[in-house]
Image: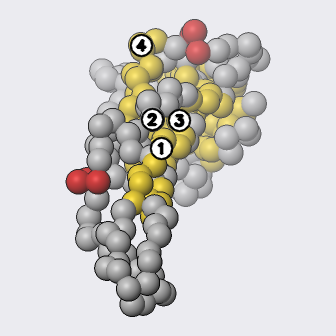
Amino acid sequence: TCVAFESIASDLDPLDTNGNFSDVFVRDLTALKTKLLSANAAGWGSGTGDSYNAAISSDGKWVAFNSDAGNLVDRDFNNRSDVFLAKLNWPLTITVNSATWQIGDPFPNFTVGYVGFRNGDGPSVLDGSLTVGTQANQQSPAGTYAISASGLTSSKYDVKFVDGTLTVTQRPLTITVNSATWQIGTPFPNFTVSYGGFQAGDDPSVLGGTLAFNTTASA
């Protein structure tokens, strides 16, 4: 639900830079955000005169208002109050769902969630193609990586993308010391180990450090 109103306050939107002139704003009661509608044609500031008599349509998509400003649109040279009609875009947030990936497994299929659709709308009303990706790859070490989405636009919604997080975890590797038998008075046996968990052709050569053995038995 949105409401349109006029105000001389200068702290409702950073774009309001015209001092004590009255401006027209719209307040989204769902997103709790206020937006300056009587902005100049360049989109980076406010009008050079008062804007007033704001009226919003029943579907919340259009706001009509009067303005004495001469810079809300190009070529406004009549030095008179004009009537303006502004189309409102509803905010739509597309958030990438976070995921966990264990090194060596197939990459997960990333998904997104949508917040802000109105009147039964869904992803089918958006233009473009959704692309979701991450900088992590099959060779990435354990850690966290951003999952980003892009590619969707709309003339009806202000689309905002929010990254998710890909948590990359190490694959468990078990190194088991093989049991041995030693007869007192004979040389100690050469201890050996077995590995469980290597993937994709890996072997002990991919490990760092030096394998060492220890036992409480002594000669």
- Furthest-bottom residue in this view: 219
Label 3: state its secondary structure. strand
Residue type of the residue flagged with mark 3: Val
Q: Dot 3 corresponds to which residue?
A: 96
Closest to the camera, between mark 1 and mark 3, is 1
Q: Which mark sits nearer the N-terminus, 2 or 3?
A: 3
Identify which amino acid the numbered label 2 is placed on: Asp
Q: Do the residues labelled 2 and 4 touch (CB within 8 Å)?
A: no
Distance between the Cα atoms at labels 4 and 3? Answer: 17 Å
Mark 1 / mark 3, whichever is N-terminal: 3
Residue 54 location, x and y as percent? 65, 30
Q: How many labels does the image show?
A: 4
Q: In this view, does 154 lie to the left or right of 93?
A: left
- Along the horizontal axis of the image, is 162 left or right of 103? right
Q: Nearer the viewer, residue 20 or 1?
A: 1
Which of 81 and 37 lies nearest the eye of the viewer? 37
Q: Residue 105 carries which label?
A: 2
Q: Is residue 78 visible?
A: yes
Check disc 1 and report its element: helix, strand or loop: strand
Camera-nearest label, 2 or 3: 2
Q: Mark 4 points at which residue?
A: 128
Residue at x 67%, y 13% (from the top left corner): 121
Q: What residue type is labelled 1?
A: Gln
> What residue do we see at 57% from left, 37% from top?
97
Query: Which residue position is annotated with label 1?
Result: 102
Please say if 124 is above or below 15: above
User: Considering only vertical position in the picture, is 123 above or below 15?
Assistant: above
Q: What element carries label 4?
A: strand
